[in-house]
Amino acid sequence: MIKLTVNGTMYERAVEPRMLLADFLRHELGLTGTHVGCEQGVCGACTVILNGDSVRSCLCFAVQVDGGRIETVESLGTVDNLDPLQAAFQEHHALQCGFCTPGMLMTGVDLLRKYPLATDQEIREGLSGNLCRCTGYENVVKAIRSAVEAGYGD
Amino acid sequence: MKPPAFEYLAPVSLEAAVAALSNEDAKVLAGGQSLVPMMNFRLLAPSLLVDISRIPDLAYITEDGDGLRIGAMTRHHAVEMSDVVRQRFPVLHAAMAHVAHLAIRNRGTIGGSLCHGDPAAEWPGLVLLLNAQLKTTKRTIPAGDFYHGALATDLADDEILIEIQFPGLAPGTGWGFEEMARRSGDFALAAVAATICLSDDRATEVRIVVIGAHATPLRLTAAEGLLTDHVSIGAAADAAMQEISPDSDLHASADYRRHLVGVLTKRALAAAWKRAA
Ligand SMILES: Cc1cc2nc3c(=O)[nH]c(=O)nc-3n(C[C@H](O)[C@H](O)[C@H](O)COP(=O)(O)OP(=O)(O)OC[C@H]3O[C@@H](n4cnc5c(N)ncnc54)[C@H](O)[C@@H]3O)c2cc1C
Ligand code: FES
Ligand code: FES
């Protein structure tokens, strides 16, 4: 039996040790915003925030996070009421197919909360573990830059 | 793919963890950033994972005289952000930026990286460069004796790495760390780390370590000797190229790696010389 808080709601579930956190979120809790691309830590689509730090939910077993606090992309906004970072992504056309976007957003949230991101180079370094096949990254960097300027996470 | 089934234990003491490791095919689980991908690929199928993250007091960075002691469960990112690491071992701070990506550095641990022993990983080279001692549940192992080969360490199946001890550097030691990877955060094609002590503008003590060019990190003793014999950095870099026998793989040919090690050695030594006082 594990107990964990996901987006502010406490869940208690019996899980097999081999269940990845990504699959727990998607299949047990129905939170399919977290995407699974590679299951080897390379693509970043599955990135969520665990106890305040961005992590790969494909490289973590649900049993390991017993007692933990998780934030997924569903913790941001809704279609009618976008979070300012989501709005910045829309505004700057920072997504096309959207597969990488949940991971980009959650990585972006972690970066915006913790680091000054004074230069675009810092944003690029921070996003280096998130692959996108569509946008060419330029607009993702612009969206995060605009969120920095708007004081996101301050 | 999905990992094969296994049993899971999260003991809260080292004694209980060691006892659990006496089970056949049991493995330590630290940050999981190397182990879980291997299980997802079904390259490994341990019967039992012993999660050591709930054992108290395995994650710390403590000053010890001029040196540092770092707990095996300390995450890469904690080392990257530590002020005392930045002051005393700036080479460790600089190298951390090359270890994978932020989300992986948030989970992955020093102990896990050392025990995994990837030939292109930074930590195994750094402990050799800095002459560290690796303290386990059984003994203390000098960094130079820790590896038998790629992904192969001197640890017994029921032995847990608990602490890495870095002796203080001589005042004024200069350092350099140069890495080439295909993309930021990828494993190194090759990297060279160096420290230099100077006296009257002459190198008195030099250590040069290369990673990614051999099954284990390698000290380039011939190149080190040339520098202390007052030969040029260029000559030391040429010697470095002759001292290694890299493999060709998907990512780079042996010739390219050898060339790269020459260039990186030159840069690392020049940076270390400049920083030495
Ligand atoms: C996409 C990606 C890119 C990466 N890039 C890099 C990179 O550029 N450079 C780099 O260095 N690493 C890189 N890594 C690996 C990462 O640094 C891992 O954190 C590290 O190799 C393993 O640490 P861990 O704590 O996650 O260990 P785990 O995966 O939990 O364990 C690794 C191995 O060590 C054993 N082990 C762990 N801790 C102990 C202990 N205290 N005592 C005894 N045995 C122990 C385990 O049983 C296992 O065999 C990358 C990983 C990924 C997924
Ligand atoms: S699915 Fe986790 S990093 Fe690709
Ligand atoms: S928007 Fe398609 S992968 Fe990034």
Image (tube, rainbow, N blue to C red):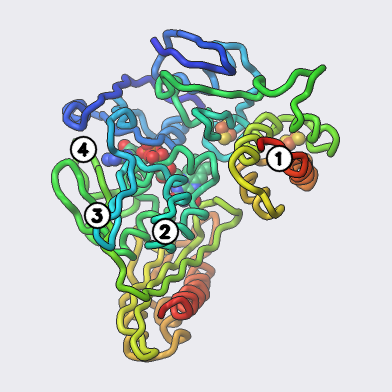
Please tell me which residue is depicted at 17% across the width and 52% down the height of the picture: B140
Dot 3: chain letter? B
Number of the front mark, 2 or 4: 2
Residue A13 visible to an observer of this rendering: yes
How far apart in space, not on screen, are marks 2 and 4 (Cα)? Answer: 28 Å
Hey, which quadrant is residue B160 in on the image? top left
Instruction: Pick whichever of labels 4 and 3 is earlier in the sequence.
Output: 3
Q: Position of residue A139 (x, y in %)?
A: 80, 43
Instruction: Pick whichever of labels 2 and 3 is earlier in the sequence.
Output: 2
Dot 2: chain letter? B
How far apart in space, not on screen, are marks 3 and 1 (Cα)? Answer: 39 Å
Label 2 belongs to which residue?
Answer: B92
Hey, which quadrant is residue B167 in on the image? bottom left
Check disc 1 and give the amino acid type.
Cys
How far apart in space, not on screen, are marks 4 and 1 (Cα)? Answer: 40 Å
Number of the front mark, 2 or 1: 2
Please tell me which residue is depicted at 19% across the width and 26% down the height of the picture: B16
Q: Position of residue B8 (x, y in %)?
A: 32, 21
Dot 4: chain letter? B
Check disc 3: other Cα within 10 Å, few if <14, some if 14-19, many if 20+: many
Label 4 belongs to which residue?
Answer: B157
Label 1 belongs to which residue?
Answer: A132
Check disc 4: other Cα within 10 Å, few if <14, some if 14-19, many if 20+: some
Is residue A50 rendered to the left or right of residue B165? right
Q: Quadrant of ligand 2?
A: top right
Label 3 belongs to which residue?
Answer: B146
Q: Are marks 2 and 4 in contact (CB under 8 Å)?
A: no
Would you say the beta carbon of the disc 2 residue lies within 8 angstroms of ligand 1?
no
**Disc 4, SS:** loop
Check disc 3 and give the amino acid type.
Phe
